[in-house]
Amino acid sequence: MTTATGHPYIVCTEEILHGAPIVSGTRTPVRAIAELWKFGIAPEEIIGRLPHLTLAQVFDALSYYQEHREAIDEDIRRNRVPAEKIHPRLQ
């Protein structure tokens, strides 16, 4: 079941990423866009890294993030890959 969010490009679909907010028509979670932006990547550059998205979708995801920052930041923390799994010598 898909749930509207009040943002034209953002939905929650229980069958995709356990209902985490995603860009409609994709499997791209808002958290991925927010994390890139938090790393200092401009929205115009984000569409270069995620070329299946439009600039409007990226801005809508960032707007959604601003309105739900605490929940999205928690989603980012929950889904972060530990450094030791990326590179074993970082333990």
Image (tube, rainbow, N blue to C red):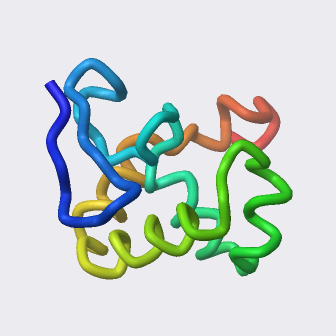
Q: Position of residue 1 (x, y in %)?
A: 14, 24
Q: In the image, 16: left or right of 13? A: right
Residue drawn at (46%, 55%), measured in percent from left and top? 31
Judging depth in this view, the residue of 55 and 33 nearest the camera is: 55
57 relative to 91, above or below: below
Q: How many marks?
A: 0
Q: Is residue 77 above or below residue 35?
A: above
Between 7 and 82, the residue placed more toward the observer is 7
Quadrant housing the C terminus: top right
- Quadrant position of residue 73: bottom left
When the figure is inspected, residue 86 is found, relative to residue 15, above or below; the finding is below
Left or right: residue 28 versus residue 88 is: left
**Observer-nearest of 47 and 8:** 8
Q: 44 and 90: which one is in front?
A: 44
Q: Residue 89: x, y in percent?
A: 81, 36
**Residue 17: x %, y % from top left:** 35, 28
Where is residue 58 drawn, in percent x and y?
Answer: 57, 65
Residue extending furthest top?
15
Residue at 78 percent across and 48 percent down: it is: 51
Q: Residue at x 74, y 49 (%)?
A: 50
